[in-house]
């Protein structure tokens, strides 16, 4: 009986520890779901405030981009204010003339009260203009090969639906780096006309 009780307690502690460090513990960017079909969706996003930095997409933040943003939310800003982590982390791939970009969504309450400015010159506060987006959800680690495959599926679905892209794709990751690949929620988003 004691063994069974210990197993239950350890399981509960593990479950609640995971819940506190998983995506469910974070504020998520709001959107209005317009259509859903299997792993495909169309969404309407409002304007969002992001704190952003340049990145190399396939680096998974190993180029220092994630830590620059993390230091900002940990108080490396002109108010020395800790800012809550949110989901998703938005990523734009490298273009032909510019580097990629990683961005954390600033929580609504911080946006309303006034967003503190970064102390690191490589970090910027910027507006992500709202609009309609086609989205595909998938699991696994984000890398160029996986993203290209998922983006191709999304573009085929858009074509079938008569949806027209208004710009390049971007990617979103919802989970902490230690989350195993099969449990990670990722998305490819394409702005629509």
Image (cartoon, rainbow, N blue to C red):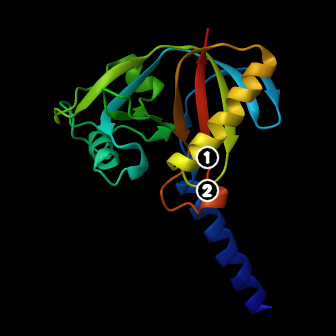
Q: How crowded is the residue under tag 2: few (<14 C-alpha within 10 Å), some, or many (20+)?
A: few
Q: Quadrant of the N terminus?
A: bottom right
Is residue 1 in view?
yes
Q: Label 1 near label 2: C-beta < 8 Å?
A: yes
**Chain-order first, disc 2 or disc 1:** 2
Residue at 62% x, 70% y is 13
Image point 50% across, 62% down: which residue? Answer: 178
Crowd rating for badge 1 (residues with CA inside 10 Å; few <14, some 14–19, many 20+): some
Q: How many marks do you count on the picture?
A: 2
- Helix, strand or loop for disc 1: helix
Q: Position of residue 80 (x, y in %)?
A: 21, 37
Residue 2 drawn above or below residue 122: below
63 sits to left or right of 159: left
Labelled disc at residue 24: 1
Query: Which image quadrant: the C terminus?
Result: top right
Up-down: is 91 above or below 18?
above
**What residue is pinned by disc 2?**
19
Residue 115 seen anywhere in this rendered image of the structure: no
Image coordinates for residue 5, horizontal then vertical, percent: 74, 83
Which residue does the image show at 39% across and 17% down from the upper left?
127
Horizontal side, residue 122 vs residue 4: left or right: left
Q: Which residue is more in the foreground, 4 or 162? A: 162
* Relative image position of residue 55 (x, y in whole percent): 33, 40
Question: Residue 44 sits in which quadrant?
Answer: top right
Quadrant of residue 111 within the rendered picture: top left
């Amino acid at each position: 009986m004691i063994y069974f009780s210990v197993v239950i307690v350890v399981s509960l502690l593990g479950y609640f520890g995971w819940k506190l460090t998983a995506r469910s513990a974070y504020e998520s960017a709001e959107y209005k779901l317009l259509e859903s079909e299997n792993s495909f969706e169309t969404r309407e996003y409002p304007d969002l405030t992001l704190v952003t930095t340049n990145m190399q997409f396939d680096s998974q933040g190993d180029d220092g981009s994630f830590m620059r943003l993390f230091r900002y939310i940990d108080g490396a800003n002109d108010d020395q204010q800790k800012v809550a982590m949110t989901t998703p982390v938005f990523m734009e791939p490298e273009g032909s003339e510019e580097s990629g970009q990683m961005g954390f969504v600033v929580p609504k309450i911080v946006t309303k009260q006034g967003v503190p400015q970064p102390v690191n010159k490589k970090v910027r506060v910027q507006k992500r203009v709202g609009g309609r987006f086609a989205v595909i959800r998938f699991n696994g680690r984000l890398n160029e090969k996986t993203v290209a495959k998922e983006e191709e599926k999304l573009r085929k679905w858009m074509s079938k639906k008569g949806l027209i892209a208004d710009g390049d794709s971007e990617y979103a990751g919802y989970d902490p780096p230690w989350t195993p690949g099969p449990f990670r929620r990722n998305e490819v988003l394409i702005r629509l006309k």
